Image: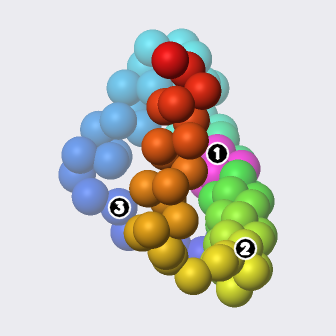
Amino acid sequence: MERVTITPEQLAAVNTAVESGNYATDSEVLRQAIRDFEMAEARRALELHALKADVAAGTKQINKARPFNVARIVKAGQQRAAKSR
């Protein structure tokens, strides 16, 4: 088995988990911690993939955007205001 160095605080947390009866051994605690880590990494990878897809979609929309035209916006606002009166 490989050796792993953990901080005194982490060792205390492992010991507390075993002493509480939630885990039978320190190895069981560490295996669960690794499973949790793997799940968190997989979730982060999915979130990153979704974020990259959103950025790509937004970039595509930006490239299709019409130029900003203040006069056109003001005119459209005036027309809407006139209709609501």
Query: Pointers 3 and 1 in contact (CB under 8 A)?
Result: no
Residue type at mark 1: give it: Asp
Task: Identify residue for label 1.
Answer: 36
Q: CA distance from mark 2 to mark 1?
A: 37 Å
Q: CA distance from mark 3 to mark 2?
A: 48 Å
Residue sitting at x 49%, y 74%: 69
Task: Identify residue for label 3.
Answer: 6
Residue sitting at x 67%, y 77%: 65
Mark 2 or mark 3, which is nearer the start of the sequence? 3
- Could you tell me if residue 4 is visible in this image? no
Q: In the displayed structure, does residue 68 sit left or right of residue 5?
A: right
Q: Which mark is residue 61?
A: 2
Q: How is the image coloured?
A: rainbow
Does the stretch in magenta take in 37? yes
Q: Nearer the viewer, mark 2 or mark 1?
A: 2
Residue sitting at x 65%, y 78%: 66
- Residue 76 screen position, x and y as percent: 56, 50
Q: Identify the secondary structure beneath mark 2.
A: helix
